[in-house]
Amino acid sequence: MTTIALVEDNKDLREGLQIIFKEHDDEFKCVGIFADAESALKKIPSLKPEVILMDINLPGMSGIECLKKIRQQLPEADVIMLTVFADDETVFDSLCAGACGYITKNASPEVILDAIREVKKGGAPMSARIARMVVSSFQGFEATSLTDREREVLAQLCKGKSYKMVADALFISHDTVRHHIKNIYKKLQVHSVSEAILVAMKKKIV
């Protein structure tokens, strides 16, 4: 039995997916349905679904931002993005943020269920074009690997330390820490400490 949570603002699609899951209740169980990211973030961590279907374009907080926050609390969950257009640039952004794949909203019920089955087996449902973009991104990351000192700074951040605590631990100035963190953000293509930590754990940098 695969447990699923759904985050989708379109009422008709939410109800349609509910029906699909109920018709296959021997294999899938929907444990939570949410119309926006804010309500999803309050409930999903305690529900601990194995798979999350996440709309990319949600009202308020976007699906990608919601994905990043959920990843911090449920790193083991598989997240599949729901999108209107398969070649949307945001699909690539969501995959780089930690999504396992995506399906279009007009996909047939069997395609949706197959996508869930695929991620449970360790797969990643996506088009060849998007897959190439992801691979190219990772290849670019390898070419701009962190220095030893940047890895040390990132390791300290992963321990929950503040900039000052990092400076004290590594016997460097506060400004030097800020300089290293700026370089880390640029190389990892992130914009916050939490994103940097998420990438560091996912790619086993530290």
Image (tube, rainbow, N blue to C red):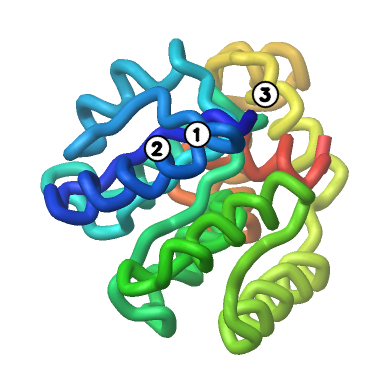
Determine which of the numbered discs, if any, sits on residue 158 in the image.
3
Depicted 50 relative to depicted 16: above or below? above
What is the x, y in percent for residue 137? 66, 73
Q: CA distance from mark 3 to mark 1?
A: 40 Å
Q: Secondary structure at mark 2?
A: helix
Visible residue check, residue 7: yes
Quarter of the image where one finds residue 143: bottom right
Is residue 84 or residue 200 the one in the foreground? Answer: 84
Is residue 133 or residue 189 the one in the foreground? Answer: 133
Depicted 201 relative to depicted 140: above or below? above
What's the residue at 14%, 54% (across, down)?
Answer: 12
Q: Earlier in the sequence, mark 3 or mark 2?
A: 2
Determine which of the numbered discs, if any, sits on residue 22 in the image.
2
Looking at the rendered image, the quarter that the C terminus falls into is top right
- Mark 1–mark 2 contact, CB under 8 Å? yes
Depicted 205 relative to depicted 58: above or below? above
Q: Nearer the viewer, mark 3 or mark 1?
A: 1
Q: Tell me the residue that label 1 is attached to.
A: 25
What is the x, y in percent for residue 183? 61, 53
The kind of residue on which mark 3 rests is Cys
The residue carrying pointer 1 sits among few (fewer than 14), some (14 to 19) or many (20 or more) residues within 10 Å by Cα, namely: few
Q: CA distance from mark 1 to mark 2?
A: 5 Å
